[in-house]
Amino acid sequence: MTLSILEKISLQPYNSLALPAEAEYFCAVNNGADLLTTLEFASARNIAVTPLGGGSNIVLAGNIAGLVLLVDLKGVSHRLVKDTVEVTFAAGENWHKQVQHCLQQGWYGLENLSLIPGNMGAAAIQNIGAYGVELADLFVSLTAIDKLSGEQVVFDKAACEFGYRDSLFKNAGRDRYIITDICLSLSLEPQLNIQYPALQVAFDHHLASGGSITPELVSAMVCQIRSEKLPDPSVIPNAGSFFKNPIIAQTQAAELSLQHPQMPCYQQANGECKVPAGWLIEQCGFKGAVRGPVGVHKRQALVLVNFGAGSGAQLLALAEEVRAAVLERFSIELEIEPRVYG
Ligand code: EPU
Protein backbone atom coordinates (compact mmCIF):
# COMPACT_ATOMS: atom_id res chain seq x y z
CA MET A 1 0.00 0.00 0.00
CA THR A 2 1.27 3.48 -0.74
CA LEU A 3 1.96 5.75 2.15
CA SER A 4 -0.65 8.48 2.56
CA ILE A 5 0.20 11.78 4.15
CA LEU A 6 -3.08 13.50 4.98
CA GLU A 7 -3.79 17.18 5.58
CA LYS A 8 -5.84 18.87 8.30
CA ILE A 9 -6.70 15.80 10.33
CA SER A 10 -8.57 15.97 13.63
CA LEU A 11 -6.47 14.68 16.51
CA GLN A 12 -9.45 14.24 18.82
CA PRO A 13 -9.54 10.45 18.36
CA TYR A 14 -5.77 10.29 18.96
CA ASN A 15 -5.57 11.88 22.43
CA SER A 16 -7.04 10.29 25.56
CA LEU A 17 -8.23 13.71 26.84
CA ALA A 18 -10.32 13.91 23.61
CA LEU A 19 -9.28 17.53 23.14
CA PRO A 20 -10.10 19.09 19.78
CA ALA A 21 -7.05 20.00 17.68
CA GLU A 22 -5.85 19.47 14.14
CA ALA A 23 -2.62 18.22 12.62
CA GLU A 24 -1.43 20.22 9.60
CA TYR A 25 -0.18 16.93 8.13
CA PHE A 26 -0.80 13.46 9.53
CA CYS A 27 0.61 10.07 8.71
CA ALA A 28 0.47 6.65 10.37
CA VAL A 29 3.54 4.46 9.79
CA ASN A 30 3.78 0.74 10.45
CA ASN A 31 7.28 0.02 9.10
CA GLY A 32 10.75 1.51 9.15
CA ALA A 33 10.89 2.38 5.45
CA ASP A 34 7.68 4.46 5.66
CA LEU A 35 9.02 6.15 8.76
CA LEU A 36 12.09 7.32 6.83
CA THR A 37 9.94 8.40 3.86
CA THR A 38 7.80 10.60 6.12
CA LEU A 39 10.91 12.13 7.67
CA GLU A 40 12.17 12.95 4.16
CA PHE A 41 8.77 14.48 3.31
CA ALA A 42 9.03 16.74 6.37
CA SER A 43 12.66 17.59 5.79
CA ALA A 44 11.99 18.58 2.15
CA ARG A 45 9.32 21.02 3.36
CA ASN A 46 11.26 22.09 6.43
CA ILE A 47 8.36 21.26 8.75
CA ALA A 48 8.44 19.84 12.29
CA VAL A 49 7.70 16.18 12.96
CA THR A 50 5.73 15.35 16.10
CA PRO A 51 5.65 11.64 16.92
CA LEU A 52 2.47 10.35 18.52
CA GLY A 53 1.99 7.12 20.44
CA GLY A 54 -1.18 6.18 22.33
CA GLY A 55 -1.90 9.87 23.01
CA SER A 56 -2.47 9.20 26.71
CA ASN A 57 0.08 11.65 28.09
CA ILE A 58 -0.44 14.77 26.00
CA VAL A 59 -2.48 17.95 26.28
CA LEU A 60 -3.42 19.52 22.95
CA ALA A 61 -3.71 23.24 23.63
CA GLY A 62 -4.05 24.06 19.94
CA ASN A 63 -3.40 22.77 16.44
CA ILE A 64 -0.07 21.11 15.67
CA ALA A 65 1.88 22.66 12.83
CA GLY A 66 3.92 20.34 10.62
CA LEU A 67 3.59 16.56 10.48
CA VAL A 68 2.08 14.42 13.22
CA LEU A 69 3.54 10.95 12.86
CA LEU A 70 1.49 8.17 14.41
CA VAL A 71 4.04 5.52 15.35
CA ASP A 72 2.12 2.33 14.62
CA LEU A 73 5.09 -0.06 14.52
CA LYS A 74 4.12 -3.53 15.73
CA GLY A 75 5.95 -6.71 16.75
CA VAL A 76 7.47 -8.49 19.74
CA SER A 77 10.57 -10.69 19.88
CA HIS A 78 12.50 -12.27 22.73
CA ARG A 79 15.72 -14.05 23.65
CA LEU A 80 16.66 -15.97 26.75
CA VAL A 81 19.58 -14.56 28.73
CA LYS A 82 20.51 -16.92 31.62
CA ASP A 83 17.45 -16.95 33.90
CA THR A 84 15.85 -13.91 32.33
CA VAL A 85 14.18 -13.09 29.06
CA GLU A 86 14.90 -9.93 27.09
CA VAL A 87 11.78 -8.88 25.27
CA THR A 88 11.83 -6.28 22.50
CA PHE A 89 8.56 -4.52 21.83
CA ALA A 90 7.88 -2.29 18.83
CA ALA A 91 6.97 1.24 19.92
CA GLY A 92 3.37 1.04 18.70
CA GLU A 93 2.44 -2.01 20.76
CA ASN A 94 -0.15 -1.28 23.46
CA TRP A 95 1.38 -1.34 26.94
CA HIS A 96 -1.31 -3.24 28.85
CA LYS A 97 -1.82 -5.78 26.07
CA GLN A 98 1.89 -6.58 26.28
CA VAL A 99 1.80 -6.80 30.09
CA GLN A 100 -0.87 -9.48 29.71
CA HIS A 101 1.02 -11.21 26.89
CA CYS A 102 4.17 -11.41 29.04
CA LEU A 103 2.23 -12.82 31.99
CA GLN A 104 0.76 -15.50 29.72
CA GLN A 105 4.26 -16.43 28.55
CA GLY A 106 5.51 -16.73 32.14
CA TRP A 107 7.70 -13.61 31.80
CA TYR A 108 7.42 -11.68 35.04
CA GLY A 109 8.06 -8.17 36.31
CA LEU A 110 5.44 -6.04 34.59
CA GLU A 111 2.43 -6.97 36.71
CA ASN A 112 2.51 -3.82 38.91
CA LEU A 113 2.38 -1.75 35.72
CA SER A 114 -0.89 -3.35 34.55
CA LEU A 115 -3.58 -1.20 32.94
CA ILE A 116 -1.35 1.81 32.30
CA PRO A 117 -2.69 3.43 29.13
CA GLY A 118 -0.49 4.16 26.13
CA ASN A 119 2.09 2.44 23.98
CA MET A 120 5.51 0.89 24.56
CA GLY A 121 7.56 3.68 22.94
CA ALA A 122 6.14 6.51 25.02
CA ALA A 123 6.54 4.44 28.20
CA ALA A 124 10.26 5.13 28.05
CA ILE A 125 9.89 8.88 27.57
CA GLN A 126 8.23 9.46 30.91
CA ASN A 127 9.60 6.33 32.64
CA ILE A 128 6.12 5.13 33.56
CA GLY A 129 5.71 3.85 37.07
CA ALA A 130 3.04 2.56 39.42
CA TYR A 131 2.61 0.51 42.58
CA GLY A 132 6.29 0.41 43.45
CA VAL A 133 7.78 -0.43 40.04
CA GLU A 134 8.98 1.84 37.27
CA LEU A 135 10.02 1.08 33.72
CA ALA A 136 13.68 1.86 34.48
CA ASP A 137 13.77 -1.14 36.88
CA LEU A 138 13.28 -3.51 33.92
CA PHE A 139 14.84 -1.49 31.14
CA VAL A 140 17.68 -2.78 28.93
CA SER A 141 17.81 -0.48 25.88
CA LEU A 142 15.80 1.26 23.20
CA THR A 143 16.23 2.03 19.53
CA ALA A 144 15.33 5.38 18.04
CA ILE A 145 15.69 7.30 14.81
CA ASP A 146 17.57 10.56 15.15
CA LYS A 147 15.43 13.10 13.30
CA LEU A 148 18.48 15.23 12.52
CA SER A 149 20.50 12.53 10.74
CA GLY A 150 17.86 9.90 9.93
CA GLU A 151 20.24 7.38 11.59
CA GLN A 152 19.25 4.62 13.98
CA VAL A 153 20.63 5.07 17.51
CA VAL A 154 20.65 2.60 20.42
CA PHE A 155 20.39 3.93 23.99
CA ASP A 156 21.26 1.73 26.95
CA LYS A 157 19.75 2.36 30.37
CA ALA A 158 22.40 4.83 31.56
CA ALA A 159 22.11 6.84 28.32
CA CYS A 160 18.35 7.27 28.89
CA GLU A 161 19.01 9.22 32.14
CA PHE A 162 15.84 7.96 33.78
CA GLY A 163 14.42 9.75 36.81
CA TYR A 164 11.01 9.98 38.44
CA ARG A 165 8.66 10.47 35.45
CA ASP A 166 11.70 11.73 33.56
CA SER A 167 14.29 10.78 30.95
CA LEU A 168 16.73 12.18 28.41
CA PHE A 169 13.79 12.33 25.98
CA LYS A 170 12.09 14.99 28.10
CA ASN A 171 15.30 17.02 28.45
CA ALA A 172 18.37 17.20 26.18
CA GLY A 173 16.86 14.66 23.76
CA ARG A 174 13.45 16.31 23.63
CA ASP A 175 12.01 16.50 20.08
CA ARG A 176 15.09 14.85 18.60
CA TYR A 177 14.30 11.12 18.53
CA ILE A 178 11.55 8.82 17.36
CA ILE A 179 11.61 5.71 19.51
CA THR A 180 10.99 2.61 17.42
CA ASP A 181 11.35 -0.18 20.00
CA ILE A 182 12.21 -0.83 23.61
CA CYS A 183 13.84 -3.87 25.23
CA LEU A 184 12.98 -4.98 28.77
CA SER A 185 14.52 -7.69 30.94
CA LEU A 186 11.87 -9.90 32.55
CA SER A 187 12.20 -12.78 34.95
CA LEU A 188 11.34 -16.41 34.29
CA GLU A 189 10.58 -16.81 37.99
CA PRO A 190 7.84 -14.78 39.72
CA GLN A 191 9.36 -11.72 41.45
CA LEU A 192 6.58 -10.31 43.59
CA ASN A 193 6.66 -6.69 44.67
CA ILE A 194 3.76 -5.87 46.96
CA GLN A 195 5.41 -3.25 49.18
CA TYR A 196 3.33 -0.33 47.86
CA PRO A 197 0.90 0.62 50.68
CA ALA A 198 -2.30 0.19 48.63
CA LEU A 199 -1.18 -3.29 47.50
CA GLN A 200 -0.14 -4.33 51.01
CA VAL A 201 -3.53 -3.34 52.36
CA ALA A 202 -5.30 -5.13 49.53
CA PHE A 203 -3.38 -8.36 50.14
CA ASP A 204 -3.42 -8.31 53.98
CA HIS A 205 -6.74 -10.07 54.21
CA HIS A 206 -5.86 -12.55 51.47
CA LEU A 207 -2.60 -13.51 53.18
CA ALA A 208 -4.19 -13.68 56.64
CA SER A 209 -6.70 -16.19 55.34
CA GLY A 210 -3.88 -18.41 54.04
CA GLY A 211 -4.05 -17.40 50.37
CA SER A 212 -0.93 -17.33 48.22
CA ILE A 213 0.04 -14.51 45.87
CA THR A 214 0.92 -15.01 42.23
CA PRO A 215 1.99 -12.47 39.58
CA GLU A 216 -1.42 -12.98 37.94
CA LEU A 217 -3.11 -12.02 41.22
CA VAL A 218 -0.90 -8.92 41.59
CA SER A 219 -1.87 -7.87 38.07
CA ALA A 220 -5.56 -8.44 38.77
CA MET A 221 -5.32 -6.48 42.03
CA VAL A 222 -3.53 -3.56 40.37
CA CYS A 223 -6.25 -3.52 37.68
CA GLN A 224 -8.92 -3.51 40.38
CA ILE A 225 -7.30 -0.69 42.39
CA ARG A 226 -6.72 1.41 39.27
CA SER A 227 -10.29 0.86 38.05
CA GLU A 228 -11.68 1.97 41.41
CA LYS A 229 -9.62 5.18 41.53
CA LEU A 230 -8.81 6.20 38.00
CA PRO A 231 -11.35 7.09 35.32
CA ASP A 232 -11.31 4.96 32.16
CA PRO A 233 -10.22 7.37 29.38
CA SER A 234 -12.69 5.77 26.96
CA VAL A 235 -15.53 6.74 29.32
CA ILE A 236 -14.26 9.99 30.90
CA PRO A 237 -11.39 11.39 28.81
CA ASN A 238 -8.23 12.02 30.88
CA ALA A 239 -4.43 11.75 30.77
CA GLY A 240 -3.86 10.00 34.10
CA SER A 241 -1.89 12.01 36.66
CA PHE A 242 -1.94 15.62 35.48
CA PHE A 243 0.86 16.70 37.83
CA LYS A 244 4.05 15.05 39.05
CA ASN A 245 4.26 14.34 42.76
CA PRO A 246 6.49 17.20 43.95
CA ILE A 247 9.76 16.44 45.69
CA ILE A 248 10.53 18.97 48.42
CA ALA A 249 13.49 19.71 50.68
CA GLN A 250 13.69 18.01 54.07
CA THR A 251 13.39 21.34 55.91
CA GLN A 252 10.21 22.32 54.07
CA ALA A 253 8.78 18.83 54.62
CA ALA A 254 9.48 19.11 58.35
CA GLU A 255 7.78 22.53 58.56
CA LEU A 256 4.76 21.38 56.56
CA SER A 257 4.44 18.19 58.63
CA LEU A 258 4.13 20.31 61.77
CA GLN A 259 1.31 22.33 60.21
CA HIS A 260 -0.29 19.32 58.49
CA PRO A 261 0.46 16.17 60.50
CA GLN A 262 -1.72 14.10 58.12
CA MET A 263 0.36 15.00 55.06
CA PRO A 264 1.75 11.81 53.43
CA CYS A 265 5.47 12.18 52.79
CA TYR A 266 7.72 9.59 51.15
CA GLN A 267 11.36 10.06 52.09
CA GLN A 268 13.79 9.80 49.16
CA ALA A 269 17.29 8.33 49.34
CA ASN A 270 18.82 11.84 49.46
CA GLY A 271 16.60 12.95 52.37
CA GLU A 272 14.15 14.93 50.21
CA CYS A 273 10.43 14.16 50.44
CA LYS A 274 7.94 13.19 47.75
CA VAL A 275 4.48 14.50 48.57
CA PRO A 276 1.39 13.16 46.75
CA ALA A 277 0.05 15.99 44.59
CA GLY A 278 -3.40 14.36 44.85
CA TRP A 279 -3.39 14.97 48.61
CA LEU A 280 -2.31 18.62 48.23
CA ILE A 281 -4.99 19.23 45.58
CA GLU A 282 -7.67 17.55 47.68
CA GLN A 283 -6.71 19.70 50.68
CA CYS A 284 -7.25 22.79 48.54
CA GLY A 285 -10.83 21.64 47.94
CA PHE A 286 -10.54 20.67 44.27
CA LYS A 287 -11.47 16.98 44.43
CA GLY A 288 -14.56 16.65 42.22
CA ALA A 289 -14.41 20.34 41.18
CA VAL A 290 -16.20 21.14 37.92
CA ARG A 291 -15.36 24.08 35.66
CA GLY A 292 -17.80 23.89 32.76
CA PRO A 293 -16.80 20.97 30.53
CA VAL A 294 -13.64 20.08 32.50
CA GLY A 295 -12.95 19.10 36.09
CA VAL A 296 -10.95 17.28 38.74
CA HIS A 297 -11.79 13.60 39.11
CA LYS A 298 -13.95 12.83 42.12
CA ARG A 299 -11.93 9.82 43.30
CA GLN A 300 -8.35 10.90 42.48
CA ALA A 301 -7.62 14.63 42.66
CA LEU A 302 -4.44 14.21 40.62
CA VAL A 303 -6.45 13.47 37.48
CA LEU A 304 -8.05 16.24 35.44
CA VAL A 305 -10.92 15.16 33.21
CA ASN A 306 -12.72 16.38 30.12
CA PHE A 307 -16.44 15.69 30.41
CA GLY A 308 -16.68 15.79 26.63
CA ALA A 309 -16.66 19.23 25.09
CA GLY A 310 -13.69 20.80 26.88
CA SER A 311 -10.78 22.50 25.15
CA GLY A 312 -7.09 22.40 25.94
CA ALA A 313 -7.27 26.05 27.03
CA GLN A 314 -10.07 25.29 29.52
CA LEU A 315 -8.16 22.34 30.92
CA LEU A 316 -4.96 24.36 31.29
CA ALA A 317 -6.90 27.18 32.98
CA LEU A 318 -8.15 24.68 35.56
CA ALA A 319 -4.62 23.30 35.98
CA GLU A 320 -3.38 26.84 36.61
CA GLU A 321 -6.13 27.43 39.18
CA VAL A 322 -5.10 24.22 40.98
CA ARG A 323 -1.39 25.08 40.77
CA ALA A 324 -1.95 28.58 42.18
CA ALA A 325 -4.04 27.25 45.09
CA VAL A 326 -1.43 24.63 46.04
CA LEU A 327 1.36 27.21 45.80
CA GLU A 328 -0.57 29.66 47.97
CA ARG A 329 -1.45 27.13 50.66
CA PHE A 330 1.66 24.91 50.78
CA SER A 331 4.36 26.94 48.98
CA ILE A 332 4.84 23.95 46.68
CA GLU A 333 5.10 24.34 42.88
CA LEU A 334 3.27 21.63 40.97
CA GLU A 335 4.65 20.62 37.61
CA ILE A 336 2.36 19.44 34.81
CA GLU A 337 3.20 15.83 33.94
CA PRO A 338 1.86 15.33 30.37
CA ARG A 339 3.47 17.12 27.44
CA VAL A 340 1.59 20.20 26.30
CA TYR A 341 1.44 20.78 22.51
CA GLY A 342 0.04 23.54 20.35
N1 EPU B 1 -4.32 11.00 47.85
C1 EPU B 1 -5.25 11.85 48.41
N2 EPU B 1 -6.21 12.38 47.60
C2 EPU B 1 -6.28 12.09 46.28
C3 EPU B 1 -5.33 11.24 45.72
C4 EPU B 1 -4.35 10.70 46.52
O1 EPU B 1 -5.23 12.13 49.59
O2 EPU B 1 -7.20 12.60 45.64
C5 EPU B 1 -3.31 10.37 48.72
C6 EPU B 1 -3.62 8.90 48.94
O3 EPU B 1 -4.51 8.70 50.00
C7 EPU B 1 -2.26 8.33 49.25
C8 EPU B 1 -1.35 9.17 48.40
O4 EPU B 1 -2.06 10.36 48.08
O5 EPU B 1 -1.91 8.55 50.60
C9 EPU B 1 -0.88 8.47 47.14
O6 EPU B 1 -2.01 8.15 46.34
P1 EPU B 1 -1.96 7.04 45.19
O7 EPU B 1 -1.47 5.75 45.75
O8 EPU B 1 -3.29 7.04 44.52
O9 EPU B 1 -0.84 7.50 44.20
P2 EPU B 1 -0.44 8.92 43.58
O10 EPU B 1 0.82 9.36 44.24
O11 EPU B 1 -1.59 9.84 43.64
C10 EPU B 1 1.09 7.87 41.75
C11 EPU B 1 1.28 7.95 40.26
C12 EPU B 1 0.19 7.18 39.55
C13 EPU B 1 0.27 5.73 39.99
C14 EPU B 1 0.09 5.67 41.51
C15 EPU B 1 0.27 4.29 42.08
C16 EPU B 1 2.41 10.06 39.84
C17 EPU B 1 2.32 11.43 39.27
N3 EPU B 1 1.29 9.34 39.83
O12 EPU B 1 -0.14 8.51 42.07
O13 EPU B 1 0.45 7.25 38.14
O14 EPU B 1 -0.74 4.94 39.37
O15 EPU B 1 1.09 6.51 42.15
O16 EPU B 1 1.62 3.96 42.08
O17 EPU B 1 3.49 9.66 40.27
C18 EPU B 1 -0.10 8.29 36.08
O18 EPU B 1 1.08 8.62 35.99
O19 EPU B 1 -0.94 8.59 35.20
C19 EPU B 1 -0.55 7.56 37.26
C20 EPU B 1 -1.85 7.24 37.44
Image (cartoon, rainbow, N blue to C red):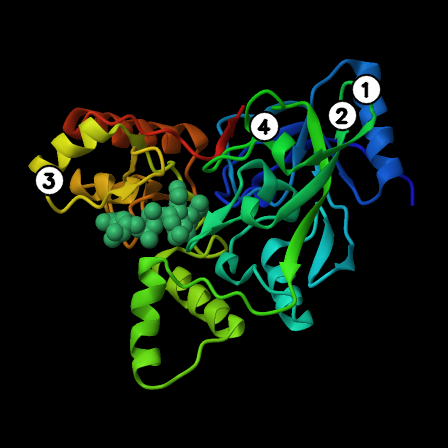
At label 2, counting other C-alpha atoms closer than 10 Å, the crowd grade (few under 14, some 14-19, many 20 or more) is some
Q: Name the amino acid type tagged 1.
A: Ser
Q: For the view shown, which residue lies furthest in the right direction?
A: 1
Q: Is mark 4 within 8 Å of ligand 1?
A: no
Dot 4 corresponds to which residue?
168
Q: Secondary structure at mark 1?
A: loop
Q: For the view shown, which residue lies furthest in the top direction?
A: 46
At label 1, counting other C-alpha atoms closer than 10 Å, the crowd grade (few under 14, some 14-19, many 20 or more) is few
Image vertical order of residue 134 relative to residue 98, above or below:
above
Q: Name the amino acid type tagged 3.
A: His
Q: Quadrant of residue 309?
A: top left
Q: Position of residue 142 (x, y in %)?
A: 71, 40
Q: Name the amino acid type tagged 4.
A: Leu
Q: Are marks 4 and 1 in contact (CB under 8 Å)?
A: no
- Mark found first going from the N terminus, 4 or 2: 2
Q: Residue at x 51, y 56 (%)?
A: 113
> What number is the disc on residue 260?
3
Q: Is mark 2 within 8 Å of ligand 1?
A: no
